[in-house]
Amino acid sequence: MGATQRPVNYTRRNYSTYRGGGPRGGSRSRARIRRRRIIALLTILVLAVGVVMVLPLVRRTIQHFELPLQYASIIRQQADDKHLDPALVAAVIYAETRFRPRTSPTGAEGLMQIEPATARFLAHRSGGYAFNVADLGTPSVNIAYGTYYLRYLLNLYRGSTVLALAAYNGGETNVDNWLASARAQHRHLTITAIPIPQTRAYVTEVLNKQRAYRSHYARQLGYA
């Protein structure tokens, strides 16, 4: 007996309707897409918040490498004792050693690069008869002597920061000779008139960094 014939109007039932291809499956598919979009948006939001929170830290880290500052409390104390601008002291340390103490080829020591002969002269003037050259390797001692020398030079050159810095780098004898030459020509000794390029660049750098330290480290240096 042959196979039973189907009615002419017979339509095969579409089971895909119940396997995700019809209305029910379409709803589930759209729900999955919405969930993925929500998760993606939340992920982007979390990442954005993370960037906003981390960015200041990154900036401070970069700033610290570009414009380092250590021993802020010692700098503030010694600057106050010697009536100096703390940012000026920090700028001199930056120009001398970038806050990485060392011994120079000429024997200058520590953060502010104090030469032993200069340190002995300062010790004699300040009454520090127990001074030892090895003490210059101690940050607090080095900054104390460096700030004392800065104050001495500022007093010597009647408060001129430019002349004091030029002497700190190039020596008092050179500055005195430059001043005598400038006076003989009836002019002032300006930064651009400093004959030694290294000293001229040094003075310029310190003055620029002084402004930067005052701006970037106002709280640490006692301005705020």
Image (cartoon, rainbow, N blue to C red):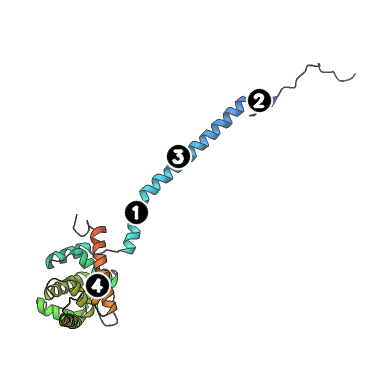
Decide if residue 123 is on the left or right side of residue 64.
left
Label 3: how many residues lie within 10 Å, few (<14), some (14-19) or many (20+)? few
Gap between marks 4 and 2 measured at Cα: 84 Å
Would you name the residue on which mark 1 appears? 57
Q: Position of residue 91 (x, y in %)?
A: 24, 67
Gap between marks 1 and 3 measured at Cα: 23 Å
Q: Is 117 placed above or below 203 here?
A: below
Label 2 sits on a secondary structure element that is: helix
| Quadrant housing residue 139 | bottom left
| Quadrant housing residue 29 | top right
> Residue 57 versus residue 83: which sits nearer the camera?
83
Q: Amino acid at mark 1?
A: Leu
Q: Amino acid at mark 4?
A: Val
Q: Which mark is residue 94?
A: none
Label 2: how many residues lie within 10 Å, few (<14), some (14-19) or many (20+)? few
Decide if residue 159 is on the left or right side of residue 212.
left
Would you name the residue on which mark 2 appears? 17
Gap between marks 4 and 3 measured at Cα: 53 Å
Would you name the residue on which mark 3 appears? 42
Q: Position of residue 179 (x, y in %)?
A: 17, 80
Quick one: label 2 or label 1, which is nearer the N terminus? 2
Decide if residue 22 is on the left or right side of residue 192.
right
Label 1 sits on a secondary structure element that is: helix
